[in-house]
């Protein structure tokens, strides 16, 4: 593997690590609101396995549980927006530190502008 290829791989690895931390941070905040706040937890809560008892009607339970997974506050919306924007726009430039930093800044600005239209 060439030096440029190794450098690209390292930069991409760093970007992925940062994004994983951001996603985990968001997940931790969601779990703090409710034991089964989002996707997998909703499935586990509403469709028990291994002989568990089911106390709620599955489709309604799952729908109600999933509705808690979406951003409720402006801060939540901004976090989800920045993560999505970064994944879509910044991964292709992850090999170039300056362009990557600029891309993250652009995502922050885009999400702040969107928030003006979405927030009441």
Image: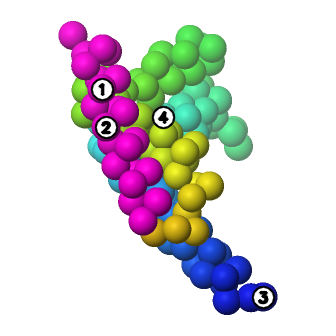
Q: Which mark is residue 100?
A: none
Q: Are marks 1 and 2 in contact (CB under 8 Å)?
A: yes
The reply to whether the magenta stretch includes residue 99 is yes
CA distance for labels 1 and 2: 6 Å
CA distance for labels 1 and 3: 42 Å
Q: Which residues are magenta?
A: 98-120
CA distance for labels 2 and 4: 27 Å
The residue identified by callout 1 is 113
Which badge, 4 or 3, is on the more N-terminal residue?
3
Which badge, 2 or 4, is on the more N-terminal residue?
4
Which badge, 3 or 2, is on the more N-terminal residue?
3
The residue identified by callout 4 is 38
Give the image location of residue 110, x and y in percent: 37, 33
| Crowd class of label 1 (few under 14; some 14 to 19; many from 20; radius 10 Å) | few
Q: Taking 108 as reference, is 46 left or right? A: right
- Residue at the image position 55 percent from the left and 63 percent from the top: 94
User: Residue lying farthest right?
Assistant: 1
Camera-side residue of 116 and 16 = 116
Give the image location of residue 90, x and y in percent: 52, 52
- Of the two numbered discs 4 and 3 in the rendering, the one whose residue sits closer to the viewer: 3
CA distance for labels 4 and 1: 27 Å
Q: Secondary structure at mark 1?
A: helix
Which badge, 1 or 3, is on the more N-terminal residue?
3
The residue identified by callout 2 is 109
Q: Secondary structure at mark 3?
A: loop
| Crowd class of label 3 (few under 14; some 14 to 19; many from 20; radius 10 Å) | few
Please say if 78 is above or below 118.
Answer: below
Quarter-wise, where is residue 82 in the image?
Answer: top left
The residue identified by callout 3 is 1
Q: Are marks 4 and 1 in contact (CB under 8 Å)?
A: no
CA distance for labels 4 and 3: 41 Å
């Amino acid at each position: 593997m060439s030096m440029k290829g190794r450098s690209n791989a390292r930069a991409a690895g760093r970007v992925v690590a940062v994004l994983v931390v951001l996603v985990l941070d968001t997940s931790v905040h969601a779990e703090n609101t409710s034991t089964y706040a989002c996707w997998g937890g909703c499935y586990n809560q509403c469709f028990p396995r291994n002989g568990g008892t089911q106390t709620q009607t599955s489709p309604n339970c799952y729908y109600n549980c999933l509705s808690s997974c979406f951003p409720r506050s402006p801060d939540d919306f901004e976090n989800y927006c920045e993560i999505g924007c970064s994944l879509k726009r910044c991964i292709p430039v992850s090999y170039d530190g300056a362009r990557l930093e600029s891309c993250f800044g652009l995502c922050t600005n885009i999400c702040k502008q969107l928030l003006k239209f979405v927030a009441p």
